[in-house]
Every structure is written in C-alpha cells, then in structure tokens.
Image (cartoon, helix red, strand yellow):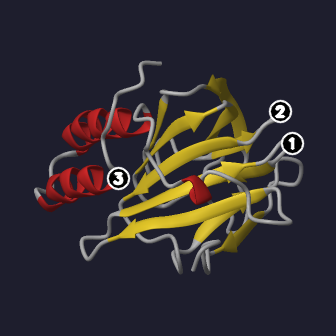
Amino acid sequence: MTTTLSYALEEFVQEMSKLVDEQPDQETLFDRGSAHLERLINSRDAIPEEYSIPMPGKNHGTYLLHYGDNGLLVTSVVWGPGDHIGPHDHRTWGMIGVVGNGITETRFRRVDDRDREEYAKLERDRETLVQPGDISLLIPDVDEIHQMDNYSDRPTVEIHVYGNDLRGLERSSFNLETGEIKHFATTKFSNC
C-alpha cells in the first residue's frame, strides 16, 4: 500500500459524481471509479477520524459521507473485532475499498433455478482477505452476494461507494443452511 499525501473526500466525491453523471458503461465506471477510490483509500486523511471507529458502545459503525442527487452514495464502514455479516446482496453496483486493517470477504453465487420465492441455493465461490489498498467490486445479479468477517482483534475501516442510496432499497440476506431469503432495507446510518 502506497500512502499518498492528500486526496480529500471532497475531491473524490466531485470526481465520482462527474463520472456517474456521464453514465458510462459498467466497465468504464469500475475502471475509472476504482482509480479514484484507490487514491482515496491510500490517502492518509481519507476520512475524518470520527468515521473510522466503531460507534460508542457498539462493535460496528456505518457512516454516511455523501449522498447525491445522481444516486451516488459514499459511506465509511467500520467492522469491529470479530464482526460478521452473513451472505447478502446489494441490488446496485458497488465498490469497497479497505482503508485500514483487513477483512475476509466470502463471495457466493446462486445455483438454484430461482423458481421458488423466498428460497435460494448458494455455492461458495471464493474467499479473499481484502487488505488496505484493495478494492472489491459488486456487480448486481452477477457477483454481489458476499459475507464479511473481521477475524482480527482490530477494527477494519472501509469506504463503500454505491450507485443508489441503500436506505429503503430492498435487499436480501441468505441462510446458507435452509436456503431461506429474508428481505431487508437499511433504514439509517450511524451518524444520521
């Protein structure tokens, strides 16, 4: 990981907003967007300090950093030691960049024929230790179902960038043992 001297969150938001407004194809969006996100996560002042620690009394924190009229959503997510979230989807494109520590991301693919509502059979696709400076891409309906685990004894800090506001967006979590699908929506962030 190479730390850059300075690349402010505001610069990143401006560049990403301009990119999203251009409505590029997915490959261009991810190529150019990843370059912007890489600069941000490698900047020593990527996000304010208060958005890089878990909420007081909690082991987790999800902080809204930006939401724009064009749908661009930028958050800081802090996974405390031992933090875990099971398989879930996003229903929008996404880019996740690790700022500090590391996190284990397990990706799944759906292998059922999707003929039963509220049921999905998932197969483990790959497991990756995502480290500082790394970026993970989420492609709706293709490669977006993942599980996140912080097996370390330190918080992991990530910056998440999405094409839609997750607040109110119906998403799904998946039970690996029963195949049950549960629907949920983010209702708020830790700071608002």
* Residue highlighted by disc 2: 151
* C-alpha gap between disc 2 and disc 1: 5 Å
Residue at screen point 40% across, 35% down: 43
In this view, the residue farthest toward the top is 1
Q: Quadrant of residue 103?
A: top right
Tag 1: Cα neighbours inside 10 Å, few (<14), some, or many (≥20)?
few
Q: Secondary structure at mark 1?
A: loop
Tag 2: Cα neighbours inside 10 Å, few (<14), some, or many (≥20)?
some
* Residue highlighted by disc 3: 9
Please report whichever mark, 2 or 1, sits nearer to the chain's N-terminal start. Answer: 1
Residue at screen point 85% across, 34% down: 153
Which amino acid does the dot numbered 3 rest on? Leu
User: In the image, is residue 192 above or below residue 3?
Assistant: below
In the rendered image, is residue 189 in sight? yes
User: Where residue 166 sits: x, y (%)?
Assistant: 50, 70
Q: Quadrant of the C terminus?
A: bottom right
Please report whichever mark, 1 or 3, sits nearer to the chain's N-terminal start. Answer: 3
* Residue highlighted by disc 1: 82
Q: Closer to us: mark 2 or mark 3?
A: 3
Which amino acid does the dot numbered 1 rest on? Gly
The residue lying toward the viewer, choosing from 70 and 3, is 3
